[in-house]
Structure formats: structure tokens, C-alpha cells
Image (tube, rainbow, N blue to C red):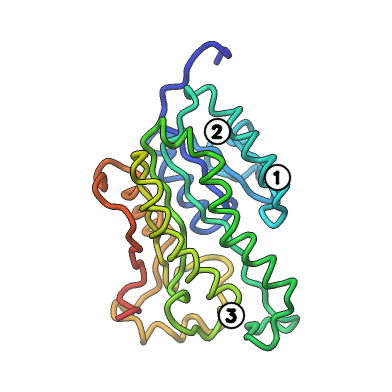
Amino acid sequence: MSETTRDERKTLVLTGASRGIGHATVKRFSREGWRVITCSRQEFADNCPWPAGPEDHIRVDLSDPEDVGFAVSEIRQRLSANGNTLNALVNNAAISPKTEGGARMDSFKTPMHIWRDVFQVNFFAPIMLARGLFKELQNGKGSIVNVTSIVGSRVHPFAGTAYATSKAALNSLTREMAADFGPAGIRVNAIAPGEIETAILSPGTEEMIDDIPLRRLGQTAEVADVIYFLCSNQSSYVTGSELHINGGQHV
């Protein structure tokens, strides 16, 4: 495609695209014909499911505020092919540190530098990206989806305190952003997944199935479907909401 040719596809910017929910989201939006710009700490992987991956992948360390700023500049430059228009931003990337033995870090065991790193990636990076890409989102009357978690509203046996509180804060931020971004025609929602079957399930997750009304783990594709719904015209009057994707585990 020449530099003077405008790409008419809808465009998604997605963080945390290299595995799990992020990987499934890339597949879902690609199937619908969207251009997907991915952001993660890793280089582009050869087994990723979309052909334009190498040219639409940005390596960024979201724990480094300066690097996030560089990423915003790079994304804005790449969006020039779409008429400086962004249709969706999905803040999926997150970190959940464990102890050396793999146990959850509670309020006492979490060092302060871990608190800062977790909140930078899970909370500050989403608002930095949204603010940095505001004009492009406004041009596209775009949608922002923040990925929170069931652990943001209840104590969880595997999720650490810093991770859980960062997700609770992100849910509150979603409501505030919906009010602030709404007048520009930008919708902001959150999804709160429960126990989702991925390659990095915590040991003991299977034992929690009896506490889930649907008696099974969720699939990453099911989460991606809800993300797509929130970025599509089917949810054009939905903003400021957190949708639970947990098989009824929250009831």
C-alpha cells in the first residue's frame, strides 16, 4: 500500500496481544476485517494469527512511562494510513506478580516497587494511552475497553493484592472516563473476566469449577466476542459499564 493510499479498514489498538485473551481478540477482529495494531513487551511471534502482524506490532514496556509515551507517538504515526482515525482501544495488558514459590502476594508481602510496577502497567498505562490517542479516537467515534477482573470486586485465592486493587481502580477509572470522553463521542467500558482457560492457569483453578454456576471455565474466544461487541455498533449506547464474563461466578 502506498503512503498516499488511505486504509479504509476499522482499526484496533490492543495491548497484551501475545497470548490468551489478547491472542483471541486479534483473531476475532481480524476475522471481521479490522486492522489490528498490537502492543506488547515481546517481539512479534511467528505463530501469531494475522498476516500483517510484523508491520502492525509495536514493542513497548508499559511499566516504563517514557516508553509508553514513545509508543503513543509511534501509534499516532501509523494511524496516518487510516486518516488519523482509531476505532477502538483495548487495554488488555496486565501483570500479576507472585512470590518465588508462586503464591499470591498479599498486603504484607508485596514490596512497594511491585505495587508501583503493577499500577503503572494495569492502571496508569491505560489512561496514558487513552489520553495520548484521544484525537484519533474522537475522529473515529471510537470505543475503549478496559480489561478488569473478577478479583477487582472480591478477594481471590490466587490473585495478589496489588493486582486486585489495580483492577478495582481500573473499573472506577472506566466510569470516570465514560463521563469525560463521552462528549467527544467516545464510549468507555470494561469487561471483568472470571476463570478463563489459558495456558497460564494457576494451579488449583480447576477445583473452583464447582463454585461456578455454569460448571466450566470460560474460553478466551468468549471473552473476545464480548470485547468485539463493545467495539461494534451493536453496543452504540453502552458506556460506563463493566460486563461480567465469569459463568455466574460473581452471583
Crowd class of label 1 (few under 14; some 14 to 19; many from 20; radius 10 Å): few
Answer whether labels 3 and 1 touch (C-beta < 8 Å): no
What residue does disc 3 label?
161
Secondary structure of residue under mark 2: loop
Give me the disc on residue 51. Answer: 2
Rate crowding at label 2 as few (under 14), some (14 to 19) or many (20 or more) other CA atoms within 10 Å.
few
Nearer-N-terminus badge (2/1): 1
**Mark 3–mark 1 distance (CA, rounded to whole Å):** 30 Å
Q: Where is residue 205 in the image (x, y as percent from the top left)?
A: 50, 80
What kind of residue is marked 1? Glu
Q: Measuring 53% from the left and 42% from the top, which residue is drawn there? A: 49
Query: At numbered mark 1, what does the secondary structure look like: helix, strand or loop?
Result: loop
Image vertical order of residue 246 relative to residue 59, above or below: below
Q: Choose top left, top right, bottom left or bottom right for residue 140.
A: top left
Tag 3: amino acid: Thr
Disc 3 secondary structure class:
helix
Residue depth check, mark 3 versus mark 2: number of the one nearer the observer: 3
Q: Where is residue 12 in the image (x, y as percent from the top left)?
A: 47, 39
* Residue to which mark 1 is pinned: 43
x, y percent for residue 151: 47, 76
Is the C terminus in the top left, top right, bottom left or bottom right quadrant?
bottom left
State the residue at coordinates (26%, 48%): 235
Task: Tell me where residue 241 appears, x and y as whole percent.
Answer: 32, 60
Going from the N terminus, do you reach mark 3 or mark 1 first? 1
Residue in the picture at 34% in, 46% down: 182
- Disc 3 and disc 2: Cα gap in Å? 39 Å
- Name the residue type under label 2: Pro
Question: Which label sits in the foreground, 2 or 1?
Answer: 1
Compared with 38, 52 (above or below) is above
Vertical placement of 233 versus 199: above or below? above
Q: Is residue 30 above or below residue 66?
A: above
127 with respect to 176 (left or right): right
